[in-house]
Image (spheres, grey):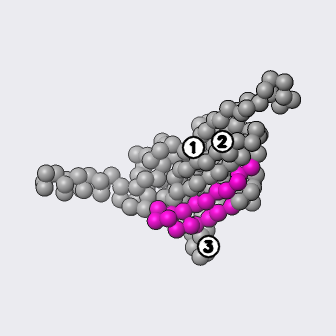
């Protein structure tokens, strides 16, 4: 067992060169569907579910597209009651309350309250109000990565869901490109 531990540690080290990026895109971004409690006689009975898309990576690459963290939805989500972002140690990095989904003014640009740009993995808690009054709380993790920085675990890149990969209706759209070519090497 003593011999096995150093080998495992070496494998983990070589799999991820920069510890702050190790769990970036470890899981796919958040795509959620919530059935709405709307009867067939309701005037809005054509949409029966709330859709929500939250990317799991923001990339500082200068293109102005994927450089921020933002929540997207369809009309089934009427309000973001709260969005709180924390680093892995639990330090608050960003928060917004009572905003609309896809409101660019409510996006996090990665700048902390101290004025520095955050890099690495972070956690978020999102509380939303649905069209029918339901309140849902979702937790997830995402990553802030400067384009071209060393140490990103590229084997996890297929799980990355970028800001611009939303279809405008609260769903992930894999036909939209991710970050600029050359960012992840």
Residue 181 in sight: no
Viewer-side residue, 27 vs 136 = 136
Per the image, the residue denoted by label 3 is 113
Residue at point 70%, 54% (across, down)? 81
Which picture quadrant has residue 94? bottom right
Q: Disc 1 or 2, which lies upstream in sequence?
A: 1
SS for dot 1: strand
Residue at point 83%, 31% (across, down)? 44
User: Horizontal placement of 92 versus 167: left or right?
Assistant: left
Residue at point 36%, 55% (across, down)? 16
User: Horizontal placement of 145 versus 11: left or right?
Assistant: right
Q: Is residue 95 magenta?
A: yes
Residue 115 in sight: yes
Q: Please give the label number shown on residue 135.
A: none
Which picture quadrant has residue 60? bottom right
Residue 2, horizontal then vertical, whole percent: 13, 55
The region drawn magenta spans: 79-96
User: Horizontal placement of 3 versus 40: left or right?
Assistant: left
Residue 128, horizontal then vertical, whole percent: 68, 48
Residue 123, horizontal then vertical, whole percent: 52, 57
Residue 45, horizontal then vertical, whole percent: 80, 28
Q: Please give the label number shown on residue 30.
A: 1
Q: CA distance from mark 3 to mark 1?
A: 25 Å
Q: CA distance from mark 2 to mark 3?
A: 27 Å
SS for dot 2: strand
Residue farthest toward the top in the current orientation of the protein: 40
Per the image, the residue denoted by label 2 is 52
Q: CA distance from mark 1 to mark 2?
A: 8 Å
Q: Is residue 141 magenta?
A: no
Q: Are marks 1 and 2 in contact (CB under 8 Å)?
A: yes
Q: Circle 2: is it few (<14), some (14-19), or many (20+) Cα within 10 Å?
A: many
């Amino acid at each position: 067992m003593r011999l096995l531990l150093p080998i495992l540690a070496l494998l983990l080290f070589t799999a991820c060169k920069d510890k702050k990026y190790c769990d970036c895109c470890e899981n796919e971004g958040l795509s959620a569907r919530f059935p709405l409690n709307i009867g067939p006689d309701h005037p809005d009975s054509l949409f029966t579910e709330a859709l929500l898309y939250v990317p799991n990576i923001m990339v500082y690459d200068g293109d102005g597209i994927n450089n921020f963290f933002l929540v997207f939805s369809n009309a089934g989500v009427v309000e973001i009651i709260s969005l709180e972002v924390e680093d892995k140690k639990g330090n608050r990095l960003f928060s917004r309350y009572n905003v609309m989904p896809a409101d660019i003014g409510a996006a996090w640009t990665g700048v902390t309250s101290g004025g520095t740009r955050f890099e690495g993995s972070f956690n978020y808690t999102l509380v939303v109000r649905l069209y029918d009054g339901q309140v849902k709380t979702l937790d997830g993790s995402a990553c802030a990565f400067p384009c071209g920085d060393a140490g990103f675990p590229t084997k996890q890149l297929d799980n990355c869901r970028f800001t611009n990969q939303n279809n405008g209706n609260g769903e992930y759209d894999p036909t939209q490109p991710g970050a600029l070519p050359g960012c992840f090497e």
